[in-house]
Image (cartoon, helix red, strand yellow):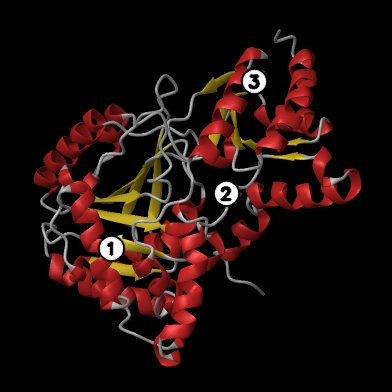
Amino acid sequence: MIAEKMKPLVANNSAIRTMFEEGGRMKAIYGEENVYDFSLGNPNVPTPPEVKQAILDILEEEEPLRIHGYMNNAGFPETRKAIADSLNRRFGTAFGTNNIIMTVGAASGLNVALKTILNPGDEVITFAPYFLEYNAYVNNFDGVLIAVPADTETFQPNLTALEERICAKTRAVIINTPHNPTGVIYTEETLKALAEILEKKQQEYGAPIFLISDEPYRELAYDGAEVPWVTKYYANTIVGYSYSKSLSLPGERIGYLVIPDEMEDSENVIEAATIANRIIGSVNAPSLIQLVVERCIDTKCDVSYYERNRNTLYEGLTKLGFTCVKPQGAFYLWLKSPEEDEAAFCAKAKEYHILAVPGTSFACPGYVRLAYCVSWETIQRSLPAFARLAADYHLN
């Protein structure tokens, strides 16, 4: 009865969501304080107080039709201008209102971008490990996702393997930095080398290749790390952003796309993306939260919460003998499974009420992801359980 495209999605429902739901079941049995759920990237850092105040002020000051009504499919011009001005101040760019399209979070933004540029059979390349929903997003528009194998030494993009996979069918490359699931930030050197490859391949095939930079974790960077601004290195770049993490608003579904004027045929791309924003079913981004973003343009959540969590979990696990990639950003710890079958390792961890996501969920077996956007107390309570898990594998 259901569509053929939906059958594999039903059969292979997200392991992350499944584990999250399993966590709820276990908490009901064992008590929330006795379950260490590192499955879902659901921010636990409080929303900044400026956001609540902005909502209250908007409800008092703005006309109801503006708060709750339709606007241009690209979003309120004032909000888009505020975002463009903020990006220009921070990154030395020259964006205008027309370069910003408000979207229903980064996920919808990626779908808008792909709807805008893909023809059936076009290929989109990304780097393992990657957020597995990219498969569904590309498939939504009859594209084909091509995964580049991971560089497990650095977890920077494997550019040699990328160059081998670009062909006449390649329409786009998706990157994600700071990275889910590894926490790695792509370096300026990496991005420049990536841009050189794409420029060369565009010339070779006589067609544009888009770079889509998925950046919901941009503001979550540690130890003074800088996250390079990608449009500086490659003109045919589309940036997708979300306030889910920077303002701890995942359920409000608010984000934006940046489409620079330097892009080839940018006017048509911007117009097509604005129409795509409507016809994929979103119509426009939520009006109230657009107005909140405009008033809170320079507000950020307190990243020190996540940094303390990172330090506590990384230091605790490495002392126990686990091998982990130290995150530079985002809020995920990428841990090497002490046995080849990381699903079996996750099952063993579950015996100690630790919930982790296997690396096969990110097209990179042999690793597991721990989302440390939980309370610091949860991390502290989890360490004795991890110690018992480490003892099972004789890591100490």
Name the amino acid, label 3. Answer: Gly
Question: Residue 332, percent across and down?
Answer: 54, 37
Question: Residue 357, percent across and down?
Answer: 64, 38
* 353 lies left or right of 79: right
Q: Is residue 356 visible?
A: no
Residue 239 lies in quadrant = bottom left
Residue at image x 26%, y 77%? 77
Tell me the SS state at disc 3.
Answer: helix
* 231 lies left or right of 23: left
Q: Residues within 10 Å of mark 1 (few under 14, many from 20)?
A: many
Residue at image x 36%, y 29%? 156
Dot placed on the residue nearer the N-terminal end, 3 or 2: 2
Distance, label 3 to label 2, CA atoms, is 21 Å
Dot placed on the residue nearer the N-terminal end, 2 or 1: 2
Residue 220 lies in quadrant = top left
Residue at image x 30%, y 37%? 165
Can you identify the residue that label 3 sits on? Answer: 316
Distance, label 1 to label 3, CA atoms, is 39 Å
**Is residue 222 depicted above or below 71 in this figure?**
above
Can you identify the residue that label 2 sits on? Answer: 45
Tell me the SS state at disc 2.
Answer: loop
* 307 lies left or right of 218: right
Can you identify the residue that label 1 sits on? Answer: 83
